[in-house]
Image: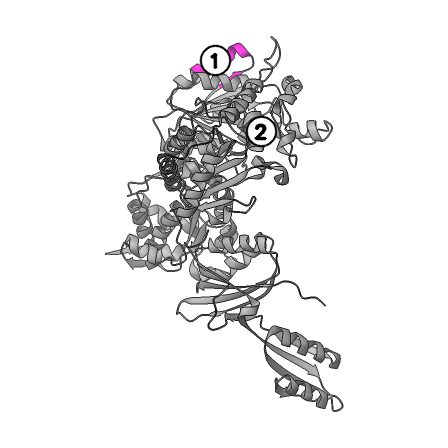
């Protein structure tokens, strides 16, 4: 069967079970958009290519399936760099297809030409410039295989226009052929048996263990086996920003998020621990604070599918390279074997009660506003949480609102939290929420955004309206770049430099309406719940609520950048209890 | 002059467009300086061997090796211990050599078992193949005559016969 390169590309995507792709056509990718008209694949037409990338990420976050974006060459490819980098940092499986100028024009500075594979080399797990139409099926299969196995990540395929137009004899490579075609790609999934035994022994022997759980747990779809390990050993769990939802917040063993804006209990438990059972986490600087003072007494078990994470920041005592799900199952089995052989777990009741003491002393807290005062952002989040339909997916941008979302939401199920952790991409939430809603049309999707973030990618609400993707957006609008304002207040003697946006423009309600959404403004506490209930009841179009919130509100607790976790700053109302953190 | 602590990485890669750029940009992004680099096709068709010399402490070296492993085009990485490897490099140099000094230059080349490649009016082109340390000495001794142009290839290396390579790893077997 003879096909054009473009037909082969679309057919290959169909055979990879792609149900939806996000994109925007242009000159060089034009040939691929023609067979798309006859394809079963849904295409969501975005308003800016960055939006397509974040939508693909949001889709991948909630479904676990690779997100697919397709855009043209040159400026479209450069607009895709931020989402690719975002997906690379947060290990999101994604396949991005870019058009390229015809092979004969490559290197001539042709119209809309850029060195896409060169530019994206350091922000992708792999990328490939396809020079022959007959290579397309294999390259597409390789891309999906690489994006979804090992440590997941984004893969980019750059296809010149003439390669899309040329004809080729159709074929479909087998799994074995794909593996064989990549001799340098052999991810390890099974942990080393000796290390597994050693880990099990350490877990039973330690007096102050903590399960330090990162986003890798979700990538490995290992939430259930994590719970089995935690309940078997009764070891407390901290879930990083990327792992929120991997362990139920209502579970008595869950201490919440550790790190820069983590709970005092989670951060302190890591500090005082004698054993960190690190599962799919990477000792990010937002978790460790000053690395040399991080968890000084702790031995480290480090389970990660990426060998390069072992010893990158903190040298592990027991390194285990492997898939978190497979390794945790093996550790659980090894612990059970040891217990069956008459070994005992050291009594950790004292440690548990010390941790519970911190939880009682240091709950998350904020001061409720007095009548007539500005609305508190935390109150808005609590109301959003309490009124949310079951299974609601929460998507955040980057900044104060993101931290409050992580802190105040109660995540009970995995894959209900989507955010930009590693790269910290402002403008992530609106397009990512659209992608999440496309992945789970039956679930309510709330995007929590700041007014700064919202203005970076709000145009995608036009996409959402036109494509009938009814997401809900809560803007915690303080007219500031709030997190930067907080740092300037705390560390730059309240010298506010270029952080004040505007309380008047844009008018977010009118803007929302102009984009085909319902717009609601909320200024006082009594308006909060009715507005949220109204938004939750609308399912035929997107809704935007403009919550006008108190700009002076800061995120606490806080470990200032470069500080030790021992020196975390408590909210002012808890400062006097500091001594109990010992 | 004390020589910096160097490590030799012998990296077997797929011989494909862009693979050198991938390796080089990885070193740049992680802040590692490449001391010398040599690339050429290897024993198996479709493969190339990149010999990279880096000056780093052991801990960051481990990290760069692991990061290199993650490149899809990289098949095998061996770290070669200089004491248990054969290292070779080629030097080409054009040196000033008029009637008065030509004899001394020729003598020097003979002592080092190098070659006179070409002879001009007041200069000669010489070549020397050998251990990089030997090339360093040769270069130092040539300089006083007046170095017109100098080109060295960068080091290539293979493990000595009959001994184990100090650390050799194929993907899937590390960690």
Which residue does the image show at 65% across and 32% down from the upper left? A560
Q: Which residue is mark 1?
A: A529
Which residue does the image show at 60% across and 53% down from the upper left? B31
In the visual, does A576 lie left or right of B153? right
Q: Which residues are magenta?
A: A520-533
Q: CA distance from mark 1 to mark 2?
A: 35 Å
Across and down, in percent, residue A171 comes to: 26, 56
* Residue furthest to the top: A371
Disc 1 + disc 2, Cβ < 8 Å:
no
Is A153 placed above or below A131 here? above
Identify the mark nearer the N-term, 1 or 2.
2
Q: Which residue is mark 2?
A: A268
Residue situated in front as seen by the camera: A469 or B22? B22
Q: Main secondary structure of the magenta part?
A: helix
Across and down, in percent, residue A335 comes to: 39, 36
Residue situated in front as seen by the camera: A348 or A266? A348
In the visual, does A496 lie left or right of A409? right
- Label 2 resides on the chain identified as A
Residue situated in front as seen by the camera: A526 or A387? A387
Q: Quadrant of residue A549?
A: top right
């Amino acid at each position: 069967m003879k096909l054009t390169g473009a037909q082969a590309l679309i057919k290959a995507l169909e055979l990879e079970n792609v149900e939806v792709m996000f994109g925007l056509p242009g000159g060089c990718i034009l040939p691929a958009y023609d067979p798309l008209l006859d394809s079963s694949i849904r295409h969501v037409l975005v308003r800016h290519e960055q939006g397509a990338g974040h939508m693909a990420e949001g889709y991948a976050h909630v479904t676990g399936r690779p997100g697919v974006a397709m855009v043209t060459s040159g400026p479209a490819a450069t607009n895709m760099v931020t989402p690719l980098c975002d997906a690379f940092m947060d290990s999101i499986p994604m396949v991005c297809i870019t058009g390229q100028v015809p092979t004969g024009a490559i290197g001539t500075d042709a119209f809309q030409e850029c060195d896409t594979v060169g530019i994206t080399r350091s922000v992708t797990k792999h990328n490939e410039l396809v020079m022959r139409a007959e290579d397309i099926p294999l390259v597409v299969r390789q891309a999906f295989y690489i994006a979804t196995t090992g440590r997941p990540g984004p893969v980019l395929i750059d296809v010149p226009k003439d390669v899309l137009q040329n004809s080729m004899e159709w074929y479909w490579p087998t799994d074995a052929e794909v593996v064989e075609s990549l001799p340098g790609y052999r991810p390890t999934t099974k942990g080393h048996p000796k290390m597994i035994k050693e880990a099990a022994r350490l877990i039973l022997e330690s007096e102050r263990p903590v399960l330090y759980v990162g986003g890798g747990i979700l990538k490995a779809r290992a939430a259930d086996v994590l719970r089995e390990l935690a309940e078997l050993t009764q070891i407390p769990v901290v879930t990083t920003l990327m792992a929120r939802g991997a362990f139920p917040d209502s579970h008595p063993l869950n201490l919440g998020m550790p790190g820069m804006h983590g709970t005092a209990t989670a951060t302190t438990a890591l500090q005082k621990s004698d054993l960190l059972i690190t599962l799919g986490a990477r000792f990010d600087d937002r978790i460790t604070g000053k690395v040399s003072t991080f968890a000084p007494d702790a031995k480290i078990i480090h389970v990660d599918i990426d060998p390069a994470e072992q010893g990158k920041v903190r040298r592990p005592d027991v390194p285990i390279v492997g898939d978190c799900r497979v390794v945790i199952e093996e550790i659980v089995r090894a612990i059970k074997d040891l217990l069956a052989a008459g070994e005992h777990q050291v009594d950790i009741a004292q440690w548990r009660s010390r941790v519970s003491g911190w939880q009682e002393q240091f709950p998350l807290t904020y001061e409720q506003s007095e009548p007539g005062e500005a609305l508190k952002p935390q109150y808005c989040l609590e109301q959003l949480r309490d009124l949310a339909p079951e299974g609601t997916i929460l998507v955040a941008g980057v900044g104060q609102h993101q931290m409050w979302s992580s802190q105040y939401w109660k995540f009970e199920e995995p894959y209900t939290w989507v955010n930009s952790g590693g790269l910290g991409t402002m403008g992530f939430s609106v397009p990512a929420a659209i992608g999440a809603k496309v992945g789970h049309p039956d679930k309510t999707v709330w995007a929590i955004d700041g007014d700064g973030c919202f203005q970076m990618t709000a145009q995608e609400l036009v996409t959402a309206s036109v494509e009938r993707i009814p997401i809900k957006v809560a803007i915690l609008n303080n007219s500031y770049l709030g997190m930067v304002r907080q740092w300037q207040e705390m560390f730059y003697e309240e010298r506010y430099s270029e952080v004040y946006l505007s309380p008047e423009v844009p008018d977010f309600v009118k803007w929302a309406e102009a984009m085909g959404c319902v717009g609601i403004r909320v200024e006082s506490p009594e308006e909060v719940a009715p507005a949220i209930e109204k938004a939750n009841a609308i399912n035929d179009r997107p809704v935007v609520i403009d919550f006008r919130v108190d700009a002076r509100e800061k995120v606490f607790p806080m470990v200032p950048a470069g500080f030790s976790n021992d020196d975390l700053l408590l909210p002012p109302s808890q400062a006097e209890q500091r001594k109990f953190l010992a | 002059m004390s020589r910096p602590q160097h490590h030799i990485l012998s990296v077997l890669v797929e011989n494909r467009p862009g693979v050198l750029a991938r390796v080089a940009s990885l070193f740049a992004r992680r802040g590692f300086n490449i001391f010398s680099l040599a690339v050429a096709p290897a024993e198996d068709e479709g493969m190339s061997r990149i010999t990279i010399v880096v000056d780093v402490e052991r801990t960051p070296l481990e990290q760069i090796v692991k990061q290199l492993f993650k490149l899809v085009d990289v098949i095998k990485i061996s770290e070669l211990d200089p004491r248990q490897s054969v290292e070779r490099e080629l030097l080409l140099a054009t040196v000033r050599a008029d009637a008065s000094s030509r004899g001394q230059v020729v003598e020097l080349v003979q002592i080092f078992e190098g070659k006179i490649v070409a002879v001009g009016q007041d200069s000669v082109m010489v070549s020397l193949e050998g251990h990089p340390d030997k090339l360093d000495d040769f270069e130092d001794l040539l300089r006083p005559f007046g170095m017109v142009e100098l080109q060295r290839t960068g080091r290539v290396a293979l493990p000595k016969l009959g001994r184990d390579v100090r650390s050799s790893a194929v993907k899937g077997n590390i960690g």
